[in-house]
Image (tube, rainbow, N blue to C red):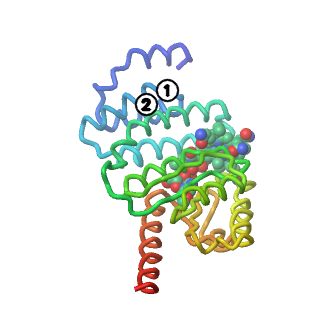
Amino acid sequence: MSNVEELQYEEELDLSTLTDDELVEQMFDDMYNGLHDELIEGTDILLERGWAADKVLNDVLVAGMAIVGADFRDGILFVPEVLSAANAMKGAMAVLRPLLAETGVESIGKIVIGTVKGDIHDIGKNLVSMMMEGAGFEVIDIGINNPVENYLEALEKHKPDILGMSALLTTTMPYMKVVIDTMKEKGIRDDYIVLVGGAPLNEEFGEAVGADGYCRDAAIAVDIAKSLVAERRGMAQAAFG
Ligand code: B1M
């Protein structure tokens, strides 16, 4: 299909007439092509059809981004196209956000989270933030490209239970150790639970940089955060009666 034909096809296509499977395939294409409004429309339709927000997130948006990621890796897609896809994904995530983040839940803990210096990837971090909020955590998101000073300032200001760091590049992930080592030098490392995540990381790396936990995905981040906060509070209660 030529670009013009493809555009006409997109204009004429009524997403609501598609079956679920067809719609999901179409949404993969829409994300791939950076069609922000169409991806939001598809998200709305699936929700109206009774899909749970986390199913739309995982089976459509995260799966769609994996397709984009594979073609980016293989040199089929380039930065501008991936940016458009990311922008479309963010639009659809904004629709899901209120559904994933229950309101009125009493905070079960506080997390400061940010992407490390030199790294501007934020979709995964945003997803973790949304899932954490949904689970009842208060989330302070300090954004992307954070030097150690930003983390320290946010810790001092917000006094969270958890510091979360995200990195998507093999060149930026070592910066997590810089942050943790600086916390050690300042004598504040043990005041916080430190969780790390991002596609190139693994369990071994998390241990090597001195984090308390490596989180493979957002759901695991929530589980680890809950259990480590509970453990820490239990220990504090035992110590102080
Ligand atoms: Co970039 N990029 N990118 N990119 N990009 C990757 C990461 C890459 C793997 C693509 C590839 O080659 N296959 C590759 C890194 C290779 C490497 O380091 N070995 C890469 C590259 C090379 C680059 C540039 C250098 C390209 C260039 O300029 N030549 C450049 C770097 C810019 C910079 O940061 N300085 C760059 C730029 C970009 C865009 C701006 C175009 C865009 C980012 C847009 C944005 O985020 N706003 C982008 C994207 C979208 C990607 C891919 C395609 C998708 C990342 C993503 O959003 N995944 C990515 C390929 C890939 O990962 N397959 C790629 C979806 C997201 C839901 O998953 O982020 O893994 P993820 O998050 C998960 C878990 O990892 C975990 O939970 C999340 C949810 O389940 N998690 C945490 C993440 N953070 C956590 C923090 C926690 C806990 C869990 O704290 C507690």
Q: Is residue 91 left or right of residue 56?
A: right
Q: Could you classify mark 2 by the number of other residues whose Cα lies within 10 Å: few (under 14), some (14-19), or many (20 or more)?
A: many
Measured from the top left, where is residue 65 in percent x and y?
52, 42
- x%, y% of residue 114? 60, 52
Question: In this figure, which residue is indicated by the disc labeled 1?
Answer: 35
Q: Position of residue 87 (x, y in %)?
A: 54, 33
The foreground one among 21 and 99 is 99
User: Is residue 44 rendered to the left or right of residue 169?
Assistant: left
Task: Please name the residue shown 24% across and 37% down the image.
Answer: 49
Mark 1, other Cα within 10 Å: few <14 / some 14–19 / many ≥20:
some
Residue depicted at 40% across the width and 30% down the height? 40
User: How far is disc 2 from disc 1 in space, using C-alphas?
Assistant: 6 Å
Horizontal arrangement in the rendering, residue 148 relative to residue 84 (left or right): right
Which residue lies at the image location 60% right of the left edge and 45% below the top edge?
143
Residue 74 seen anywhere in this rendered image of the structure: no
Q: Are marks 2 and 1 in contact (CB under 8 Å)?
A: yes
Residue beneath label 2, please?
A: 39
